[in-house]
Image: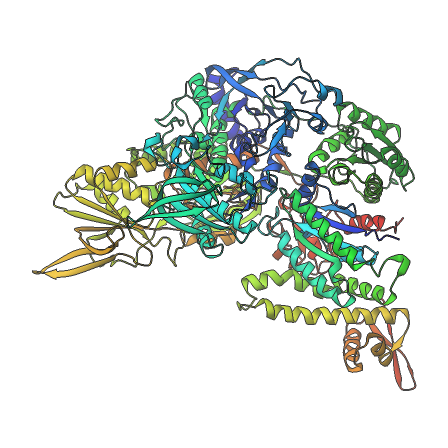
Amino acid sequence: MKFNPKILGFLCNWCSYAGADLAGISRIQYPPNLRIIRVMCTGRIDPVLPLEALANGADGVIIMGCHPGDCHYMTGNYEAERKIKMLKKLIAPLGLAERLHVEWVSASEGARFAEVVENFTNQIKVLGPSPLRQEKLDLSKWEGIQAAKEAVEDFRLRALVARERKIIEEGNVYGEEISQEEFDRKMDDALTAEYIRNRIYLILEKEPTSIKQLSKRLNLSSKHVLDHVVLLRRRGLVTVDKIEDMTPIYSVLKR
Amino acid sequence: MKSTTLRMANMNSQDTVSKGRKVGSVLVVGGGIGGIQTALDLAESGFKVYVVDNSSAIGGVMAQLDKTFPTNDCSMCILSPKLVQCGRHLNVEVLTCSEVTKISGRAGNFNVSVKQQPRYVDIAKCTGCGLCAKFCPVDAIDSFNKGLRDRTAIHISYPQAVPLAYMIDREKCVGCGLCKNVCLADAISYLEQEKEVTLNVGAIILAPGIREFDAKLKSEYGYGRYPNVVTSIEFERILSASGPFMGRVQRPSDGEIPKKIAFLQCIGSRDVTCGNGYCSSVCCMYATKEAVIAREHMSQIEPTIFYMDLRAHGKDFDKYIERARNKYGVRFARCRVSEVKEISKTQSLKIRYETEDGTQHEENFDLVVLSVGFAPSETVEKLAKNLGVELNKYGFCKTRTFYPIETSKPGVFVCGMFSSPKDIPQTVTQASAAAASVGKLLFSVRGTLIKKKKFPRELDVKGQPPRIGVFVCHCGINIGGVVDVPSVVAYAQTLPNVVYACENLYTCSSDTQEIIKNEIKEHNLNRVIVASCSPRTHEPLFQETIREAGLNSYLFEMANIRDQCSWVHMFEHEAATEKAKDLVRMAVAKAAKLNPLDRILLDVIPRGLIIGGGLSGMIAALALAEQGFETYLIEKEKALGGFLRNIHNTLEGEDPQRFLKELIRKVKDNHLIHTFQGVNIEEISGYVGNFRTTIAHASEKSELDHGIIIVATGGEEYRPKEYQYSMDPRIITQSELEDRLSTTTISTRLNSVVIIQCVGSRDNSHPYCSRVCCGEAIKNALKIKEKSPTTEVFILYRDMRTYGFAETYYEKARELGIIFIRYNENKKPEVIKKSENGRESLSVSVYEPIIGEQISIDADLVVLSAAIVPPDGNKILAKMLKVPLNEDGFFLEAHAKLRPVDFTTEGIFVCGMAHAPKSIEESISQAYAAASRAATILTKTKIEAEGIVALIDEKMCTGCGTCIILCPYGAITKNDVGVATVTAVLCKGCGLCAASCPERAIITPHFTDEQITSQTRALLGRITA
């Protein structure tokens, strides 16, 4: 059967949604795969929302907003850009990064809007159906995206990404300049850690498991897994369920 | 309470003279950005407004622009919300295809005759669907796109046009009758006749704009003969994504992408041979912008700008030029082009020019853009004659330095290009200023002619299960011709919570509004969905309809199945129908989760506070007080007057000191103005409508309550560190020279005076242009010549930036023998002191580019044109007000183009040199503008917050402060118990805080995570109950 991608777009009201309207007014034809959700500003796009779409089997998610400097609310698009960058990193290990895309389209760029949609649709066609489509669900990826979703619902990543722009552009609380590379390193560490922790949590939530088993399922060293479990215990999320033959079995405490 | 009584008292005293005679309505001539802004300001402050425009839609030149400098903002993105606001405002009536033919009466009460040309299309009925244009068999030229594209005889001027109604071009129409046959809205009326309308108004604002110079008159550049010589406005359309080439840079002769593009400056400007001795003020910047945008489109393009002086005199303009030069590789060539010839084989162009050193050059280009200047049109001249308004020698509206908004006729005001060439922010500033001037004239009849919409009591739907009605539009055949509308309706009926669904030919027509209201009652609908066009244009209409049926306007949702479906998938009927169903399903899922939202009302303290008692501050104070508002005026120094105290004459020969004295007297005499001199501000708290400011004078403290703040802290003269200033009494600053010229007769023994420009401007420490110094230098140089004709005066400059009419004085200075020598920023002049025969002689050494040698000029006096710098206090004040400064330390407005006196924080405004260096005239305009913007708040007893305002769950908030850092409007603060709280009136509902809150403790109503997720899930087939 021919693959007909389902693509979800989050468009800002002032620039991109208007650009999409202009494509219509100008009768510029593009593939009929995109469904648009209008938001007032790309800054409104909680990182959970694109992941929610991917988790529900969207083949692609595209976010479109005002060009840099054009944001109706001053800075929303800059913040969105950083959030999407974070999300792409987070879902890259799941092979989903190319299914999430961000573009700036102004109210006068009807033709460019159509071009962007056409290119993204083609890109998704090449990638094929999402591994998270209900009909052919890839379980490990499904677990992965759930963990990613949990990770961006948690305090840490949200707090970091929300301060990224200020820290890079204006310096930190000590008045020091922080380079993008340096910040990225810290962000990447946090991303990986939070992702793994949430995966561990989700596995333990299903059934109590040992460090060794976890390490096998996640393809990570047991030392690594143990570190995360220790931290999750400290956060009060994980506890030792029982001990089987000298092996502690961990389970979750409800969040 | 005190203020209210005062306001009343003032009104009564005025009204005894004028009651029954003044009229609370205003005519605005011209619907460009100036006309739109003045109309909105007036309508928002209680006046009925008529906007008369001779074209078929409002928008003016700005609608034709691709991007705007210096921010490269998309012109249409920022303009179209204003167009819609103006078009839909209950108290703004737009009369298109109309011109004013006659006026009678006097200030306060005019009768105006307006002639309205037939449109042959009924605006009330036309839905803008475009069916007629599709079938029109007659091609005509599209004047909006400057003749670069064909359009049909029945047309709209541009896609976002307001009013969005078609019009028949009678000259092109052959009368075939096709459009009437295909129009399903029955809007075509061939029998329409020219109409005459009479309007009774209290004041008139002229905002007709001007036309661009006819480039054909400069035949040496080949415009009109060579297809690849275009004007800058044509090039603007070539660049535009909605232009003829859809944003690809192509040349008109063959559609090839031009590699080398030449911009020729001053076409019809600074040119006495064509009668235009003035500078058009904006061309250097727009040419640079066009060059940058062209480069952005195609990196292979090599733009060259041929210019005389680079006039980047506006705020942050020089930085833009530097970016263009360094980042975009735009080449700037200082020379005058003598001729353009076409190379017949390639249709490319050979340009001949002479550089500064006198050598002749020839160079080939693929496209030539003529940076045309501006001049008043003949229709405007006719209008001025009809109105009895005086024009200057160039045909612009005559105004005076201290009264920049007033025409020669009382009650008739002017704004924008018609009074002098200016850019968009200055036009918008003057537009607001004109509204304030009208406010002064008509405040006693404010609110007498405005309409207020009354809505029935809102039904309480809280707790009720959703009952959704879906109205699916055919839009003639626009939707119905592609999407299978009946099947969408049938599908909608199967969706959860949908209790009613139907189809309409035009859902936006007035009879359908009645149908919607009836069905709401009939089926007890508590949520309504319209599946038709775009919410950007039509949501307000439908929201009003459901309000009329007693539903909260937020219980409405749209599915865009036309602009984003049927029009873009015209040949895929099945896929389009599927998509339409998906979009309706998503809308239904969201609608089920919609909640009614209330708009919070807050009291306004009808008093103003003005910080700074210089020219701008005093003008703003008077502009408020004379509209009946009590005003506090705070000055940190003992005396009023600010920088104006240093200015003793103007280029035009007026007396600033007399004006200042009179102004101070008026301020002191006005019983509504409370002046505090020699005081400091200790604290400012509160928000729009409700500010509290603590001031300290001597050992006393007082608290002032007020509704708005105007920042008018002014600017200061830079104390030069360069050119041995302060080390020799013969080296002085420009204002010191001015002071001397006004108090002592300049000695005729002065053989030579050397004036050095850009001292502390456009350098590393102050990378901006101080805007006023070129004019000031010429003014004082002329004064020296007047007092002592034998004194030689030299002006050493980098670019002479005598923009607008000041150019004529530059011309005059050259005629009088004042010598202008250009210096390069890398080869600055040097002041040299030498001891000879016991006497120290002074000379200035400078590289003379025309003869190509270093020369030395003996000087009896060296005058330094020192920069205008922001006062140090700006930093503290900015922190107190929580408003930003730009890199140079001047206050940063909300938007460089369209909100030049507003801050992003509502209720706070800026004017005068606090904003950037500017002239007396410009400061006065801006002060009026700030007062006008302030009046839109002060005239309301209550202000309404947006319905969509962030909500914080205090129990979940940990007080981490993330939202406070991110909020662009300073709408979130920490309360006493350490959790974040939203000031509803300041929140714009963008949702950034909600998307970023680490605890997910914030909700953006109407766009909640739950609502968006339910849309997502509905699309992807996991419908949640």
Please report the residue visible at 52 percent of the width from the left and 29 percent of the height from the top.
B7
Identify whether B179 is placed above or below B809: above
Nearest the viewer among B589 and B988 is B589
Give whichever of B128, B900 is nearer the camera.
B128
Residue B451 place in picture, x, y as percent = 64, 24
Residue B17 in view in this figure: yes
Q: What is the tally of numbered marks visible in this picture?
A: 0
B186 on left or right of B432: right
Residue B771 position in % (x across, y down): 37, 45
Q: Quadrant of the C terminus of chain A?
A: bottom right
Above or below — where is A211 with respect to B182?
Answer: below
Give coordinates of residue A221: x percent, y percent. 79, 81
Color encoding of the figure: rainbow
Who is closer to the viewer here, B750 or B847?
B847
Please identify the residue farthest to the bottom as the structure is shown.
Answer: A246
Q: Is residue B1018 left or right of residue B13?
A: right
